[in-house]
């Protein structure tokens, strides 16, 4: 008991007790040696682990680190005694030490990892829960100490362990796990060998750089004495897929599926994707059912994380997937995964540009629909024909999982097909009618899927075709959600509400059932079901007698009943009072409330002090309830987005629930909330602008105030400032507190859109708090950086690969520069040194790309100032950009080239010329990349072309433009990064306009065959090329409309001169001449 008390004191009062740590460590070390009491030993392990968080100096860390071997010995002894619970508790301490920023495991990491590997590999000797805990240690190694994993070449050992764990999985169905083996409400799949292996592989591929883990996982390397490849080389996918042992083949497809998310960038380079897809297609034909299932899962993951590239392989993939349904007596799980692959592949079509692919959903509609609904000659899963039963027609398979997946695939197909799906509408609605009337509670999941499918079908068919059926099917939906208390059914109903809002627009508020729909959303948002408080283990949970707890529950019940009786009695007395007596009673109640409010303020202060002691409290969320809540919020967002001003009557009710949920402990709910808040502010802004249409900025996706850079003297519409002051502080606080990077990125993406929408005035009073938050973010002192520590040598040069939130924060700085112009520079100057740290050579390429991209984003927003606003940053910024441009990563090189061009436009002539030769050499290197090179090379080349154009435009009188301009023209057209056309045509228009008189004289001299050095600056053939490029640009769909308008204006101005007209008439090819002539004609108003 005394050791348990000591441990709790360290956890909750460690800061206060730190001066006694020396004596306490002696006590705990003694406890580690108490072999007669494993409980004392384990409590001592926990206490020492708790001390680590309070260590600050190297000497302290070294002293405590010296006790680590004794702590490991305690767990070793528990293992020998079969004390599994204490083994798990002890390993949990080491997991927390791996997460910690304090490098207490630095000297013992390798030996400790080997110890955990031995436990994790103990097949048939230890239960899966103990082995899983050891694997958890390795997953946290990958998350928090990736450099240590790389330094000691642990990746292949981890992958080998994963292969062995996958091979332990016996059956295609989820393995059965004993109830006592399932901890902390985890489902059985989390404690199977397969589930544990997938968890570790996921963290490997997400956190270890792809350049390291991808080749190790895929390619068979030659033996290397300096690595473990000579021991573990047979874990590579290329070898595993060809093994005779089906379990080893299975491990290859599992590894392939798990790597896609983390390695998607490198997978999409070169032939990597094609090679892996061929292996996966081989797998779906494998003689082993488990291999087929895992291969389909791999294909599904490719569809999810490489969607734009996958659509290009439709001829390779879809026919083979359809053929798989011809296999007789196929396992249900394989059929379900095959159908899921079709669903996700069809979804890929929504993610890609139709012009970039020859894939047409119409070509595959019939085989997809036949797969779902027609009967095959064999007893296969394609026997999903309508079948007559007592309830009517239904899917003719007895397996609910398969039925649910079939309907999900039907929904995705409808969503992707759009109007092409209309011809299937009658038969699909007939099928859904049966499914939407299911009353068997065991089949409600199928009814839920049909509910969601109905929404997709309604959008695909459109109001014209679906309208006549609406009332009947809407009644099915509303009846179902009222009749059954089922989370999955409610979630599906909310998704249907969302799609109904898109179909009906503002008329949705006219529905008799809308109030019920809205109330259901609010009730679900307010419901705390599925949210559980997990208190820290204080070691005394078993010490409280069960009889005491039962008596406490009984007493609380009696008190509640007595309170209800008092309320009934008070209600009866109130009815007997006259108006005067009742008013006195109300006044007294108001006074009492004021006194209570003062007491509450004092209680809040006490609570704030207590919260610091509750850092170990965790909130757990049941997944089903969380998804239901997120769907309800999404429905609200759609009501706002499509219902427009009709929703204004409901705003206050929604805001109350948004505030209540803002701190909800799950990213999916917070993402939905962020989107909802954004739609709410857009709606309020749009309403305010309705009264001031002259303040609306045209040519924007959303209604935007017509503001100018640096000017905050404009008027808001009604309630706009009130809502800004409510919403912006939430975003700013999220930068500090939000620990999920994707959630924070989404919030800030909305925030940036709102800044552009509302202009400089919106952020004026919040600027100081915002810049403080951004500074903390780049110093990695915010919650989303909690698992990394740039000062820790174990993590300083390896960061999470999907840290895209940094890009969004950089865009926020760029947006602030766009809003405030020169006034923003003093604020940027404070954060600039921190941003440069992210560009250091030891940082991840993505971090370096972000840093130079951020500088460029700020600079490009200041081009209009013409005062060289970035000159003070020129030396360090140019040197950094030039160094980063030498990277082998295409995105990193692109951002560096973008930075060079932006700096030239915003620095002084002296600063530009100082770095011009190095910049020209850099740009020239990448302009030599082939136009038909890889997509990444084409992007880099286009950015180099744009950078050269910006350099010439900035220093047209100082750089040798007579030599540079022909090279610039020869490099056109762009082939990949078409957004750069904005600058390309600005450059050409600049030169043509700037040298207009010389151009006219140039034609005269050349027509008379007279040469003169004065006119070498803008050669005659450059003029002809430029005119041709202008003509081609007007016809090019890749050129933005704004650039086309500028081209037309320039041509109209040029062709006012007869000498230029003569050039157009006599020297420009006929097709291009016609385009120029049309462009020069006045537009018809």
Image (tube, helix red, strand yellow):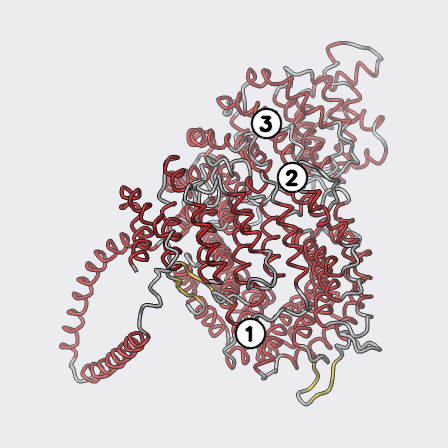
Which numbered dot is residue 489? 1
Which numbered dot is residue 881? 3
CA distance for labels 3 and 1: 54 Å
Which residue is label 2 attached to?
A: 1042
The residue most toward the bottom is 390
Give the number of the mark in front: 2 or 3.
3
Looking at the image, residue 247 lies above or below residue 949: below
Is residue 618 at all visible to an observer of this figure? yes
In the image: residue 178, left or right of residue 1006: left
Is residue 721 at all visible to an observer of this figure? no
Q: Callout 1: helix, strand or loop?
A: helix
Q: Callout 3: helix, strand or loop?
A: helix
Q: Residues within 10 Å of mark 2 (few under 14, many from 20)?
A: few
Q: Pick the residue in front: 583 or 945.
A: 945
Indicate the position of residue 622 as horizontal and vertical percent values. 48, 66
Indicate the position of residue 465 as horizontal and vertical percent values. 69, 71
Looking at the image, residue 388 lies above or below residue 84: below
């Amino acid at each position: 008991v005394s050791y348990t008390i000591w441990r709790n004191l360290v956890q909750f009062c460690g800061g206060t007790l730190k001066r006694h740590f020396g004596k306490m460590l002696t006590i705990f070390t003694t406890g580690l040696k108490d072999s007669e009491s494993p409980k004392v030993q384990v409590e001592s392990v926990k206490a020492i682990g708790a001390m680590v968080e309070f260590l600050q100096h190297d000497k302290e860390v070294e002293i405590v680190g010296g006790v680590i071997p004794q702590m490991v010995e305690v767990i070793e002894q528990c293992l020998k005694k079969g004390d599994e619970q204490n083994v798990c508790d002890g390993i949990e301490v080491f997991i927390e030490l791996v997460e910690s920023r304090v490098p207490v495991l630095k000297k013992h990491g390798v030996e400790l990892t080997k110890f955990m590997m031995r436990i994790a590999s103990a097949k048939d000797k230890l239960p899966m829960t103990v082995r899983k805990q050891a694997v958890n240690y390795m997953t946290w190694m990958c998350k928090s100490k990736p450099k240590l994993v790389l330094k000691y070449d642990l990746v292949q050992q981890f992958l080998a362990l994963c292969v062995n764990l996958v091979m332990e999985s016996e059956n295609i169905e989820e393995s059965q796990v004993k109830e006592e083996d399932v901890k902390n409400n985890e489902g059985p799949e989390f404690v199977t060998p397969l589930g544990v292996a997938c968890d570790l592989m996921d963290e490997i591929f997400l956190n270890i750089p792809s350049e390291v883990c991808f080749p190790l996982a895929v390619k068979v390397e030659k033996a290397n004495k300096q690595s473990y490849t000579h021991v573990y080389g047979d874990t590579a996918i290329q070898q595993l897929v060809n093994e005779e042992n089906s379990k080893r083949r299975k491990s290859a497809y599992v590894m392939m599926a798990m790597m896609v998310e983390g390695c998607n960038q490198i997978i999409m380079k070169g032939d990597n994707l094609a090679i892996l897809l061929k292996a996966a297609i081989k797998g779906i034909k494998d003689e082993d059912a488990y291999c087929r299932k895992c291969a389909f899962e791999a294909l599904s993951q490719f569809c999810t994380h490489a969607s734009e590239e996958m659509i290009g392989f439709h001829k390779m993939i879809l026919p083979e997937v359809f053929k798989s349904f011809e296999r007789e007596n196929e396992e249900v799980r394989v059929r379900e995964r095959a159908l899921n692959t079709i669903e996700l592949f069809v979804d890929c079509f929504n993610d890609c540009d139709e012009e970039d692919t020859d894939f047409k959903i119409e070509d595959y509609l019939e085989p997809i629909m036949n797969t779902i609904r027609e009967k095959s000659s064999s007893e296969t899963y394609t026997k999903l024909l309508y079948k007559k039963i007592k309830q009517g027609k239904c899917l003719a398979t007895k397996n609910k999982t398969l039925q649910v997946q079939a309907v999900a695939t039907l929904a995705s197909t409808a969503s992707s097909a759009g109007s092409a799906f209309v011809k299937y509408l009658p038969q699909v609605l007939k099928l859904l009618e049966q499914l939407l009337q299911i009353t068997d509670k065991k089949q409600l999941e199928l009814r839920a899927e049909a509910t969601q499918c109905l929404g997709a079908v309604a959008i695909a068919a459109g109001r014209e075709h679906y309208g006549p059926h609406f009332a009947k099917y809407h009644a099915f939906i509303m009846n179902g959600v009222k009749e059954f208390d089922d989370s999955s059914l409610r979630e599906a109903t909310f998704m249907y509400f969302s799609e109904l809002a898109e179909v009906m627009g503002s008329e949705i508020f006219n529905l008799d059932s809308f109030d019920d729909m809205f109330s259901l959303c609010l009730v679900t948002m307010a419901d705390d079901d599925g949210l559980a408080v997990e208190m820290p283990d204080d070691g005394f949970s078993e010490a409280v007698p069960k009889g005491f707890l039962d008596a406490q529950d009984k007493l609380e019940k009696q008190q509640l009943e007595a309170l209800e009786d008092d309320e009934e009695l008070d209600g009866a007395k109130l009815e007997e009072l006259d108006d005067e007596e009742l008013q006195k009673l109300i006044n007294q109640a108001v006074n009492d409330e004021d006194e209570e409010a003062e007491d509450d303020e004092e209680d809040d202060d006490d609570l704030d002090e207590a919260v610091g002691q509750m850092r170990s409290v965790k909130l757990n969320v049941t997944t089903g309830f969380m998804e239901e809540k997120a769907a309800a919020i999404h429905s609200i967002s759609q009501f706002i987005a499509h219902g427009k001003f009709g929703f204004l009557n409901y705003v206050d009710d929604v805001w109350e629930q948004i505030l209540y949920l803002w701190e909800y402990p799950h990213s999916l709910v917070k993402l939905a909330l962020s989107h909802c808040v954004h739609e709410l502010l857009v709606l309020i802004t749009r309403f305010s602008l309705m009264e001031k249409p002259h303040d609306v900025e045209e040519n924007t996706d959303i209604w935007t105030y017509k503001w100018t850079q640096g000017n905050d003297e404009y008027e808001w519409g009604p309630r706009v400032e009130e809502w800004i002051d409510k919403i912006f502080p939430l975003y700013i606080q999220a930068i500090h507190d939000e620990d999920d990077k994707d959630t924070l990125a989404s919030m800030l993406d909305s925030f940036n859109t709102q800044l552009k929408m509302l202009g400089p005035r919106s952020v004026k009073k919040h600027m100081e708090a915002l810049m403080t938050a951004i500074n903390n973010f780049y110093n990695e002192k915010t919650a989303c950086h909690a698992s990394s520590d740039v000062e820790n040598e174990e993590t300083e040069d390896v960061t999470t690969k999907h840290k895209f939130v940094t890009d969004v924060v950089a865009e926020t700085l760029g947006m602030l520069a766009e809003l405030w112009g020169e006034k923003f520079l003093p604020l940027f100057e404070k954060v600039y040194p921190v941003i440069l740290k992210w560009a250091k050579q030891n940082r991840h390429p993505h971090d370096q790309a972000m840093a130079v991209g951020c500088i460029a984003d700020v600079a490009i927003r200041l081009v209009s100032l013409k005062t060289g606003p970035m000159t003070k940053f020129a030396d360090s910024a140019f040197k950094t950009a030039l160094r980063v441009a030498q990277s082998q990563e295409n995105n990193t090189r692109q951002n560096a080239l973008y930075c060079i061009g932006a700096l030239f436009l915003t620095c002084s002539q002296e600063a530009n010329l100082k770095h011009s030769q190095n910049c020209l050499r850099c740009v020239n290197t990448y302009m030599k990349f082939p136009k038909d090179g890889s997509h990444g090379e084409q992007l880099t080349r286009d950015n180099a072309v744009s950078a050269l154009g910006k350099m010439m435009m900035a220093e047209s009188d100082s750089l040798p433009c007579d030599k540079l301009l022909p090279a610039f023209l020869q490099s056109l057209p762009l082939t990949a990064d078409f957004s750069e056309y904005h600058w390309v045509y600005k450059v050409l228009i600049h030169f043509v306009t700037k040298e207009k008189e010389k151009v006219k004289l140039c034609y005269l001299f050349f027509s008379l065959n007279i040469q003169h050095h004065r006119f070498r600056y803008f050669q005659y053939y450059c003029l002809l090329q430029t005119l041709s490029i202008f003509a081609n640009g007007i016809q090019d769909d890749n050129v933005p409309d704004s650039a086309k308008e500028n081209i037309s204006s320039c041509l109209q101005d040029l062709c006012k001169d007869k000498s230029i007209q003569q050039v157009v008439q006599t020297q420009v090819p006929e097709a291009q001449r016609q385009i120029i002539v049309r462009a020069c004609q006045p537009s018809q108003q």
